[in-house]
């Protein structure tokens, strides 16, 4: 089977058994592995209403046909599960090197089901897999766990694991590979912890099955050459993802003080230049990555001097810094390191802390609720202390570990107005009031409030066209124009396709669709067009929606927090703006998607068009 091995590994943790399954060729042709195939198994195996932290939920890792191939930035793979944070379908895509080495073992994916009676970790050495005792690893950090497993096994093993936050089932705990690469969103680490699965160590040597290797290498080489001097690549290699922070702040779209404003007054203290001067050692990249947007870093002064790691990325600066109004780059970097080692999503952690601070300043939380801590914006020490408490579920950290939606439901008193999440997933650091179509992207993203489902901030916030689709520019970011909704739909489908292939989404800003489809065709050994690529993404996107509809999702969930809809931005280029015209934008979105406008369900006609007719009775009852 070109592009894959045609096999998945199934691990029943309740029974301590490991077995192999063949991937039917019909399923491979339909989904090309990736999130679409993982969602097929999740839907089939996990019953409606299953507890995300119970034995019925599954945790699925799936590679793509290009994962591990010698093409730019093809080291990515995907985790799929029912989220304990949102209670709907969830995906978390991650780079690094683990996914490549896992695919080299001869498997395209792995499915974990059940709950182990005791902590365990899985070792996959070539095509041999066994569960081992992990009692000695339970309670260890990500870095400690990785080090101990590598010492135990010897040789070159890659490790993916959870930290303390996953063990404590913090609802936004991450799954971490290569120490610093996070499957960060939706709480996959909590699902892993609920199964008492501490880690997976892999070693493999099997090559990726490429149908036409010489032609594939020719196209890939051309891409590497074109990327070498590409402005997008040069900018990210030089400044990392934090390169965008000044542009976002100028637009008035950098969420500050829990989204009370979109302008951070002391930006020069935390922007890309500050990061480079204060903590950067050198840029680093994932497998086969010429962009190298990662930051190898070390804190060189102050109370955290000597701490080393990677990052922080833009989102960590935006949430642990901007939303909490922390102006100390060294403190932001240290908090980011802590989140990685505990296994915490920095977006949800920073957002939840900012929400708690605003609740405290409004008198909704008091010192009796916060273990005596005085929560104030700008207090880096408080942010640091709350990171520790959340990861360990100690004291007030137990409440914050639930995320903003559950916190708000417990606290009441109007807190839902400024609990900044969509469908339970905390929002990233782009204020959609400053760029209107971003609000629709947050409202419709399958896993909840999210910026990488469509990556709309590229053409919208930064005026960078996405080369895989025609005409991706937004004419006026301050206008919610239904005629531009097609750009969002095209981006969502294309991003889902890139996730399926195992490629980094940043490549879509550098590599045109013609090169992508030519490369995939040489990989698979048959014709593969741009329309085929889009259809693969659209099919995966719709199946994810079907899963969530089955779990109770409706049109009413495709909305935004009241703060974005009702509270005008007080300053900046977008002063006076709220998210406007959302119902009309949503109507247009459903029309283009082929979804029912009243319910938000994919119509029977759309499901038939995508070859998903078997799911029609589950959501339409006929």
Image: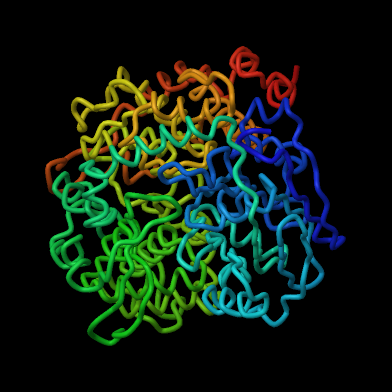
| Quarter of the view holding residue 619 | top right
| Quarter of the view holding residue 500 | top right
The quadrant of the rendering that contains the N terminus is top right
Q: Is residue 218 left or right of residue 203?
A: left
Question: Is residue 144 placed above or below 269 in the rendered structure?
Answer: below
| Quarter of the view holding residue 18 | bottom right
In this view, the residue in front, 593 or 86, is 593
Question: Is residue 292 placed above or below 149 in the rendered structure?
Answer: above
> Which residue: 57% across, 45% down?
90
> Which residue: 38% across, 43% down?
451
The chosen color scheme is rainbow
Q: Is residue 466 visible?
A: yes
The residue sitting at the bottom extreme is 303
> Which residue: 20% across, 32% down?
478
Disc tally is 0
In this view, the residue in front, 555 or 19, is 19
Q: Is residue 597 visible?
A: no
Q: Give percent across and percent down for residue 134.
A: 72, 76
In this view, the residue in front, 492 or 563, is 492
The residue sitting at the front extreme is 214
The quadrant of the rendering that contains the C terminus is top right
Q: Is residue 118 left or right of residue 192?
A: right
Question: Is residue 245 placed above or below 7 in the rendered structure?
Answer: below
Q: Is residue 499 left or right of residue 27?
A: left
Q: Give percent across and percent down for residue 171.
A: 56, 60
Q: Give percent across and percent down for residue 582.
A: 36, 29
> Which residue: 44% across, 34% down?
495
């Amino acid at each position: 089977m070109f592009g894959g091995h045609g096999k998945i590994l199934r691990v029943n943790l309740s029974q301590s058994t490991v077995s192999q399954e063949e991937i039917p060729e019909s399923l491979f042709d339909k989904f090309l592995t990736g999130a679409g195939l993982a969602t097929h198994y999740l839907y089939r195996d996990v019953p409606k209403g299953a507890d995300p932290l119970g034995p019925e939920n599954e945790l699925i890792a799936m590679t793509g046909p290009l994962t591990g191939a010698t093409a730019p930035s093809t080291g990515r793979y995907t985790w799929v599960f029912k989220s304990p944070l949102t209670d709907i379908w969830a995906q978390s895509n991650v780079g690094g090197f683990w996914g490549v080495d896992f695919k080299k073992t001869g498997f395209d994916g792995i499915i974990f089901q059940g709950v182990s009676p005791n902590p365990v970790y899985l070792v996959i050495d070539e095509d041999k897999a066994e569960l081992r005792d992990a009692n000695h690893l339970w309670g260890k950090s990500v870095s400690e766990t990785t080090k101990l497993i590598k010492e135990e096994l010897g040789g070159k093993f890659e490790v993916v694991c959870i930290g303390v936050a996953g063990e404590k089932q913090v609802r936004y705990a991450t799954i971490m590979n290569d120490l610093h690469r996070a499957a960060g969103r939706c709480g996959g680490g909590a699902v892993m912890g609920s199964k008492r699965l501490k880690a997976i160590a892999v070693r493999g040597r099997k090559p990726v099955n490429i149908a036409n290797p010489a032609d594939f290498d020719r196209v890939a080489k051309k891409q590497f050459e074109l990327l070498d001097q590409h402005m997008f690549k040069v900018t990210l290699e030089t400044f990392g993802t934090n390169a965008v922070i000044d542009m976002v702040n100028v637009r008035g779209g950098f969420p500050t003080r829990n989204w009370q404003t979109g302008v951070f007054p002391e930006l020069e203290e935390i922007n890309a230049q500050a990061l480079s001067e204060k903590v950067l050692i050198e840029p680093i990249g994932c497998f086969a990555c010429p962009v190298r947007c990662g930051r190898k870093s070390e804190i060189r002064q102050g109370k955290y001097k000597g701490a080393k790691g990677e990052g922080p990325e833009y989102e960590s600066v935006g949430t642990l810094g901007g939303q909490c109004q922390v102006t100390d780059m060294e403190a932001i970097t240290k908090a980011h390191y802590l989140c990685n080692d505990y296994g915490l999503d920095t977006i949800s952690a920073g957002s939840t802390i900012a929400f708690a601070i605003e609740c405290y300043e409004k008198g909704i939380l008091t010192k009796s609720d916060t273990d005596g801590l005085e929560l104030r914006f700008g207090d880096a020490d408080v942010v640091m202390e709350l990171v520790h408490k959340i990861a360990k579920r100690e004291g007030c950290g137990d409440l914050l570990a639930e995320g903003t939606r559950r916190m708000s439901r417990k606290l009441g008193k109007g807190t839902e107005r400024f609990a900044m999440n969509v469908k339970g997933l905390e929002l990233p650091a782009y204020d959609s009031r400053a760029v209107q179509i971003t609000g629709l992207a947050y409202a419709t993203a399958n896993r909840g409030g999210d910026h990488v489902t469509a990556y709309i901030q590229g053409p919208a916030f930064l005026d960078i066209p996405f080369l895989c689709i025609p005409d991706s520019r937004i004419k006026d970011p301050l206008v919610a124009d239904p005629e531009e909704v097609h750009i969002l739909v095209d981006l969502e489908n294309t991003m889902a396709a890139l996730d399926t292939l195992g490629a980094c989404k940043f490549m879509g800003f550098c590599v045109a669709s013609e090169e992508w489809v030519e490369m995939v065709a040489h990989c698979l050994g048959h014709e593969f067009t741009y329309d085929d690529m889009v259809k693969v993404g659209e099919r995966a996107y719709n199946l994810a929606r079907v899963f969530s509809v089955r779990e109770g999702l409706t049109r009413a969930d495709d909305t935004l927090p009241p703060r974005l809809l009702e509270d005008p931005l007080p300053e900046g280029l977008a002063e006076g703006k709220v998210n406007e015209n959302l119902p009309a934008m949503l109507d247009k979105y459903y029309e283009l998607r082929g979804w029912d406008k009243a319910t938000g369900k994919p119509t029977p006609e759309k499901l038939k068009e995508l070859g998903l007719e078997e799911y029609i009775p589950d959501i339409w009852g006929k």
